[in-house]
Image: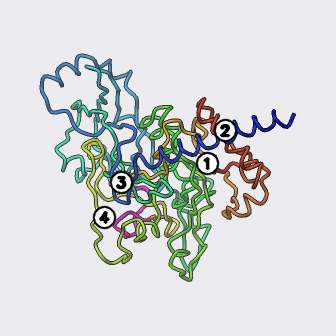
Amino acid sequence: MKKFLSIILSLLFVLYSASLVNIVFAENDITYDMGDVISFGSYPQSKVTDEETIASLNKLVPDWKYWVSYGYYSGNGENHSMVQGDWTRYIDVEFGGEKYRAVKFTQYRPNANQYEASYMTEQIRGGYKTNVIYWFKYEPIQWIILDPETGLVLSEQALDAQAFNDTSYFSNKFSYNNYAYAVFSDSSCSNYASDYAASTIRKWLNADFFNTAFSETDKADIYYTYLNNLSYYTLIDDAWAEDFDSVPTEDKVFLLSYDEVLNDKYGFGNNAYESDPLRRTTATDYAISLNGSGTWWLRTPVRSWDAKPSSLIDSDTVSTVFGVRPAMRIDFYSGDSDIPDEPVTEPDDSTTEPDDSLDNIIKDCSCMCHKTGFLSFIYKIVNFFWKLFKINPSCACGVNHY
């Protein structure tokens, strides 16, 4: 019996050592530094200009009624006048082993959703005209590594154009700090228009963008990230602190916050009043065609009707002229990701505040991965076989520790 146990333990030790060698090799084979750029996922970006390719693509487009509407909003300039339209549509096609997106709009997009079609838009500045089909090629997305230790990345360019919230409703039934009205994202006045947790841009990032930009394999390598969605006033310790805080969320794709774009750990300058070249970027051709620019949204609320873009100047949440520069945390090293790959749909807006203390989470968790000594040793062996056979284990406490 002792000999049998000895053999088993020896085998376990060999496997454990092999797993350590395998992990060390995988992580030492490639290393990343802050500021490195990697490719991950794909999205429509560059405008197709080759006339022969355009002619071939145009032969593939179906009738207009089969195109997909972006569902953009416009109004008549009056409060609460925003209505959803289908005047900008798209269709995706495959040609020559590549993927392309066609975009066509019958009116220009307003610079803010409560207005009519605008004639001072980024679309016009970019040379785009109504009732013309434009083609954009799906290309690998380039991401700047902000923190190689946590996998935090930010898209190199603004990839799309979205309002922070599609709608806004003024109400004089609510007041704060001597203001006679507040602005909400819905007619029931449930959430401020600047509430990131309830915003349409958050839903768009974790549904439309997430499902368009990433394959199922890619999705498995994207972590959930706990986000403190504090207001600008809380972050600067202002007298209005907490008036406009949004509840914490856990998302796979998100916008950076005001304090993150002032964090020198990520390579940004920490002076809000200086023009930081690392906060500046350009918009893709595709984003400009949809009225976007190189100024990009942050997730930080300001007043009930304002949020912060990268210019750090407050802006109306229904503005459409800002680009979207997604951020996320990804597994750099794993082709066999051990991150749960459940599909993401629209986030639940009823998010309750999670405990942001990892120590408390671990303290309350009974997972083997938190054990020490022999149990920890056994867990590492089991985890080796999980990786070997591409099984994605999920920790009962919901936190990725691997």
Outermost residue to the right: 1
First-in-chain label (4 vs 1): 4
Residue at mark 4 to residue at mark 2: CA–CA distance? 37 Å
Mark closest to the chain's N terminus, 3 or 2: 3
Q: Which residue position is annotated with label 4?
A: 278
Residue situated in front as seen by the camera: 386 or 36: 386
For the residue carrying disc 2, how many other residues have a C-alpha within 10 Å: few (<14), some (14-19), or many (20+)?
some
Residue 141 appears in which quarter of the rendering?
top left
Is disc 1 in contact with disc 2, using a CB cutoff of under 8 Å? yes
Q: Mark 1 or mark 2, which has the lower sequence index?
A: 2
Marker disc for residue 144? 3
The residue shown at (47%, 45%) is 25
Amino acid residing under circle 3? Ile
| Residue 402: assigned label | 1
Viewer-proximal residue among 73 and 216: 216
Q: Is residue 309 magenta?
A: yes
Q: Residues within 10 Å of mark 4 (few under 14, many from 20)?
A: few
From the viewer's perspective, is residue 2 above or below residue 325? above
Q: Nearer the viewer, mark 4 or mark 1?
A: 1
Q: Position of residue 178 (x, y in %)?
A: 55, 80
Q: CB atoms at circles 4 and 3 under 8 Å apart?
A: no
> Callout 1: helix, strand or loop?
loop
Query: Residue 393 — which label?
Result: 2
Extent of the magenta region: 308-319
